[in-house]
Amino acid sequence: MIITIDGPAGTGKSSTALAVAERLGFDFLDTGAMYRAVALEAIRRGVKLDDTRELAFVARHCRIAFDWGKHPPGVLLNGEPVGHLLRSGETTRAASYVAVVPVIRELLVTEQQRIGRERGNIVTEGRDQGTVVFPEAQFKFYLDATPAERARRRVAQLRARGEIVDYNEVLNQIVARDHRDATRAIGPLAVPPGATVIDTTTLSEGQVVDKIVATVKGNPAK
Ligand code: DC
């Protein structure tokens, strides 16, 4: 069974998808980590982020894999565990360049579909999982929240890490990123047909997880 969870950044998709996977005994596929791993490799090779041909070359010549024995699954780049390196500001920024290159999206989409076939039961999380990668998924969810709430969560997260941040700046970045994500040519962020939309603005993560698990358990697989 495949369960897709899509939505913009700041809706708690990753932690929600991981918790749902835990509750159901499914594997958790973090597709953003794959774009981030390509970005890390590009940074290591000193590739310019606007050089789409070089970025595509890097993506073709690196090996990204998951260690399914770990929870959450470990991310391996050419065999090296890199999970702890993928969430830095530099990698996050580079990933947003990597994610707009059509050839790279094709490569990673094919790989995600292969993982889905191989693992069988997965909760997969990203921007295009229910629309492009697994349109036949049994259950599709789309998490949303107001930009103001997502900015508030992001600011709290960064401040907890000791960073000094300005709320309005974060909000402007979120609005700009939403626009880029929704208007890109391939795999744009969109609500998949037939998806259950959950507005998380006033919900705790636990409440969102409960809703998803209840929907899945209450509706036998098609
Ligand atoms: O979800 P995330 O923040 O880890 O995603 C990292 C980047 O990859 C971000 O720029 C969005 C992009 N992405 C994507 O385009 N498609 C996906 N399925 C997952 C992530």
Image (tube, rainbow, N blue to C red):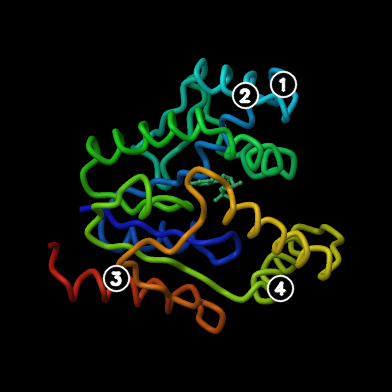
Mark 4 or 2: the one toward you: 2
Cα gap from disc 3 to disc 1, whole angstroms? 42 Å
Labels 3 and 1: the sequence-earlier one: 1
Placement of the C terminus among the 4 image quadrants: bottom left
Q: Mark 4 sits on what residue?
A: 152
Which residue is tagged 1?
47
As measured in the structure, the alpha-carbon distance from the residue carrying label 4 to the one carrying label 2 is 33 Å
- Badge 1 amino acid: Val
Q: Quadrant of residue 158?
A: bottom right
Disc 2 residue type (three-letter): Leu
Residue shown at 41% from the left, 41% from the top: 73
Pointer 3 or 4: first along the chain: 4
Q: Are the residues flagged by discs 2 and 1 in contact, CB closer than 8 Å?
A: yes
Percent x, y for residue 42? Answer: 66, 24
Badge 3: how crowded within 10 Å, few (<14), some, or many (20+)? some
Mark 4 → mark 1, Cα distance in angstroms: 33 Å
Identity of the residue drawn at 58% across and 47% down:
184
Residue with the most extreme bottom position = 202
Spatial CA distance of label 3 from label 2 is 38 Å
Residue 213's tag is 3
